[in-house]
């Protein structure tokens, strides 16, 4: 459950002492030397040193270039944030490590920080807070503000516990916000952007009983702190769910996923729309037979897993960077997992199969890459190179309903990457 944190160290870090004089600070005139020294300290020490002076606090907390240098691997996923599918199960946000405790501490440097990663100062203790998407260590959240009696969007850094509220969109009569997507790559820029799609539906003047949908893309930039419209509004005969499903930041663009035809992507540098081809539907099947088991980015690769019937064998596809097509990256056979956990082949409670792919995590090599599988009562880490698997989480019993139901939605699984990016 998301709530206001009470971590004593966090309170200390937010209360710097009065500015020291230059005589007492030997590094006052040279941020480069101070940065080199601070970069060599463990993260726990950095949080405490924020209280030395206002200048040290600003350098550690708010300098985007310092934050970028503090992230040697901005693609290393060590855990997942998960939302439950409904209130029959537990509510709130779950944080699930994907490796053993010793390794996880070496990744996060401080186990007490790890334990409080779902507590964000500045957000009330409310089950109405939801992660919309994650991008290289930052989270885009949707939160109900009890004081203002409205929903607000926030960009959060769970590692540093910093957050910022996005300014409201300029009001446009009759428009509905269809979705927001976070775009952040610390290797390209210390700043982030948020892409928004607005829709206005109106009766078609030429076609009775048909509505025209007009779409407007808008961009928020953390560098300017404001929204701007990108290009002119455009229309389409396809529904919003067809055009703007999913939404993953990859290759400098937000990439949506269509069920029926080619998908759209929006290149942020050029502010232009493009099309991405989709996999062909197998002979004898229809697009509505398709179950998208996974669509996401990891270590700057875009992946797609589709099935058309209950199976434990499938391919993991990867998109070419020039959008020329998909190729088979991994061939998966879960027969060994099904032998150990036969309940995953039962179809009751899920038309396709009683398991799902929550995440695909690419390692620095293919041998280190793995899937996170959801079974009815556990999460399983499956190595894509050799098929080895291990249970990483035992799912608590539900409060009612079918014991074979899956607890977490695929769209509610978001990777945690240790990050010190500024928000």
Image: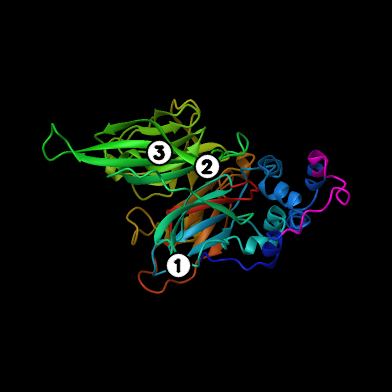
Residue at point 46% right, 60% down?
A: 129
User: Is 45 part of what is drawn in magenta?
Assistant: no
Q: Is residue 158 left or right of residue 208?
A: right
Mark 3 surroundings: few (<14), some (14-19) or many (≥20) residues within 10 A: many
Q: Which residue is mark 2?
A: 225
- Position above or below: 194 against 399: above
Q: Percent from the top left, x then y, of residue 220?
A: 48, 40
Q: Quick check: 81 left or right of 216? A: right
Q: Is residue 39 visible?
A: yes
Membership of 33 in magenta stretch: yes
- Please state which of residues 84 and 204 is positioned toward the viewer in this rendering: 204
Residue 224 screen position, x and y as percent: 54, 38
Q: Is residue 335 visible?
A: no
What is the C-alpha distance between the residues marked 3 and 1? Answer: 28 Å
- Horizontally, is 347 left or right of 125 in the view? left
Circle 2 SS class: loop
Along the viewing direction, whichever of 93 and 44 lies nearer the viewer: 44
Q: Which mark is residue 272?
A: none
Check whether the beta carbons of the residues at disc 1 and disc 2 lie within 8 A of each other: no
Instruction: Report the mark closest to the observer, 1 or 2.
Output: 2
Q: Earlier in the sequence, mark 1 or mark 2?
A: 1
Which numbered marker is on residue 91?
Answer: 1
Q: Residue tagged by mark 3?
A: 256
Q: Quadrant of residue 406?
A: bottom left
x 38%, y 36%: residue: 217
Q: Nearer the viewer, mark 3 or mark 2?
A: 2
- Which of pointers 3 and 1 lies earlier in the amino acid sequence? 1
- Reading the chain from its start, which is encountered first: label 3 or label 2? 2
Classify mark 2: residues with Cα within 10 Å, few (<14), some (14-19) or many (20+): few
User: Which contiguous range is marked in magenta?
Assistant: 16-34
């Amino acid at each position: 459950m998301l709530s206001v944190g009470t971590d004593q160290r966090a309170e200390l870090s937010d209360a710097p002492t009065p500015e020291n004089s230059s005589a007492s600070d030997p590094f006052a005139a040279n941020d480069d030397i101070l940065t080199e020294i601070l970069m060599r300290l463990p993260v726990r020490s950095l949080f405490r040193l924020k209280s030395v002076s206002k200048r040290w606090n600003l350098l550690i907390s708010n300098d985007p270039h310092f934050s970028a240098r503090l992230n040697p691997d901005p693609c290393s996923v060590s855990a997942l944030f998960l939302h439950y599918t409904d209130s029959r199960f537990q509510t709130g946000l779950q944080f699930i490590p994907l490796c053993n405790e010793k390794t996880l501490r070496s990744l996060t440097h401080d186990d007490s920080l790890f334990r409080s990663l779902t507590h964000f100062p500045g957000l009330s203790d409310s089950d109405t807070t939801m992660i919309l998407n994650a991008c290289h260590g930052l989270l885009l959240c949707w939160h109900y503000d009890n004081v203002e009696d409205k929903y607000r969007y926030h960009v959060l850094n769970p590692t540093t516990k910093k957050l910022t509220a996005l300014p409201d969109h300029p009001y446009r009569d009759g428009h509905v916000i269809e979705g927001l997507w976070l775009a952040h790559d610390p290797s390209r820029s210390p700043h982030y952007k948020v892409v928004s799609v607005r829709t206005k539906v109106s009766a078609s003047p030429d076609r009775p009983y048909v509505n025209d949908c007009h779409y407007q893309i808008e961009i928020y930039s953390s560098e300017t702190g404001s929204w701007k419209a990108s290009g002119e509004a455009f229309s389409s005969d396809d529904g919003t769910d067809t055009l703007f499903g999913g939404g993953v930041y990859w290759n400098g663009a937000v990439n949506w996923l269509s069920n029926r035809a080619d998908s759209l992507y929006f290149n942020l540098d050029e502010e232009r729309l493009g099309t991405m081809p989709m996999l062909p539907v197998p002979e004898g099947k229809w697009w509505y037979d398709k179950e998208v088991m996974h669509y996401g980015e990891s270590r700057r690769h875009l992946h797609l897993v589709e099935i058309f019937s209950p199976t434990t064998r499938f391919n993991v596809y990867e998109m070419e960077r020039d959008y020329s097509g998909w190729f088979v990256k991994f061939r998966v056979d879960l027969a060994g997992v099904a032998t150990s956990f036969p309940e995953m082949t039962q179809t009751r409670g899920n038309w396709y199969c009683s398991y799902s792919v929550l995440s695909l995590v690419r390692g620095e090599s293919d041998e280190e890459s793995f899937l996170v599988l959801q079974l009815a009562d556990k999460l399983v880490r499956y190595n894509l190179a050799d098929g080895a698997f291990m249970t990483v989480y035992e799912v608590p019993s539900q409060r009612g309903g079918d014991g074979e139901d899956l607890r977490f939605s695929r769209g509610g699984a978001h990777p945690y990457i240790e990050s010190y990016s500024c928000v």
